[in-house]
Image: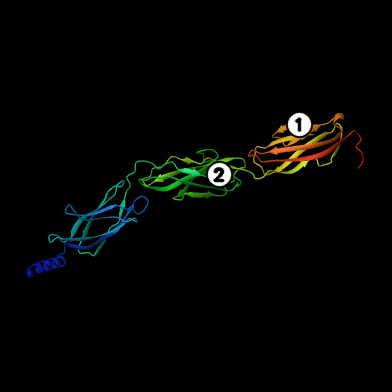
Amino acid sequence: MAKINIKILSLILFCFFISGCFSGKIQGVVFNASNGFGISSAKVEVLWKGSVIASTTTLPDGSYSLNVNIADESSSALNFLVSFTKNQYATFETQATVNNLGTLKLDAGLTPLDFTPPTTPIVTDDGETTTSTNFLHFSFSSEDPESGIVEYHYSIGTAPYRNDVLGLGLAGQNTEITCYNLNLAIGQTYYVNVRAKNGVGLYSEFGVSDGIRVVGGPLTIDFFYPDNKTKYFVSQKVDMQVGLRGGTPPLTYKFLVDGQLKQSGSAAFFSWPTGLESSGKHILRVEVQDSVGNSTSAEREIFIYRFPIPPE
């Protein structure tokens, strides 16, 4: 029994007095070399003279820690190999040379093995229409299970894939953007284009939003000439003119006299010629409709007399 105790004591003394000895902890972080994110469940192995003497897997944040004990009386310094491996990543190996250390820190950046681009981004704007002529808000998303998305780029145009409103900009890893100071035109439809870049530098195709149209808000009549109760005499022209506020072009104007349509189109002005048969009271009406279905109308009552017009 005493003989066994002597052997154990001899091993402890050996590890303290020879220079080729390592008894301690190896710890560090395994991360994606492209984006710096920790890699979970990566395999970490310590090889000594071709054999695995310790192994573990990384935690969700990419960190790991394992204990290693090596004693070799033939070497003044210990040279061992640490291997970091995970599917879809290139294996990283590092040669460690140590003397008698308590803790050795080894971080490893694994390069993703990725030969395919990210998926085409799905781009979403704020709906079919907006009343803002100053800004646009949109969100987007793409996927790349091999090496991840490292950045997005976006542009805005008056047609899909065009960037005539806003040139290509960098969104980083943001997936929601609001662009200001755009000077958007009422009645115009705008499209957002987005592409994604993965961890090995491959770009996706551009994803495009379904378009958002700038509308002018409620349609109201600012003025309608002639004024109510205006008097004319026969053979005078009755000039009808309307001014609007709001609405979304193109606009359609309809001018009616006593319920009969006289003119329909894009003109905001109509001149009605009168004659002897026109004498009497008449109702003038204008109806306006914009391109998104808003409408408004106004009426005026006029009198046409045979010459001369009676005094007030």
Check disc 1: other Cα within 10 Å, few if <14, some if 14-19, many if 20+. Answer: few
Query: Going 83% across and 38% down the picture, which residue do you hit?
Result: 302
Return the x and y of residue 176 as percentages of the image width and height. Answer: 49, 49
Return the x and y of residue 204 as percentages of the image width and height. Answer: 42, 41
**Residue pushed farthest bottom?**
2
Which numbered disc flags the more N-terminal residue, 1 or 2? Answer: 2
55 on left or right of 209: left
- Indicate the secondary structure of the residue bearing disc 2: loop
Query: Going 47% across and 41% down the picture, which residue do you hit?
Result: 207
Q: Which mark is residue 127?
A: 2
Amino acid type for the residue under numbered disc 1: Lys
The image quadrant that residue 276 belongs to is: top right
Question: Which residue is more in the foreground, 39 or 80?
Answer: 39
- The answer to whether 106 is drawn above or below residue 274 in the figure is below
Query: Going 74% across and 37% down the picture, which residue do you hit?
Result: 286
Q: Quadrant of the C terminus?
A: top right
Amino acid type for the residue under numbered disc 2: Gly
Q: Which residue is mark 1?
A: 262
Q: Which mark is residue 169?
A: none
Question: Which residue is more in the foreground, 299 or 11?
Answer: 299
Q: Quadrant of the N terminus?
A: bottom left
**Residue pushed farthest front?**
1
Q: How is the image coloured?
A: rainbow
Return the x and y of residue 125 as percentages of the image width and height. Answer: 53, 45
Question: Which residue is more in the foreground, 53 or 167?
Answer: 53
Return the x and y of residue 198 as percentages of the image width and height. Answer: 39, 45
Check disc 2: other Cα within 10 Å, few if <14, some if 14-19, many if 20+. Answer: few
- The answer to whether 147 is drawn above or below residue 17 in the figure is above
- Indicate the secondary structure of the residue bearing disc 1: strand
192 on left or right of 33: right
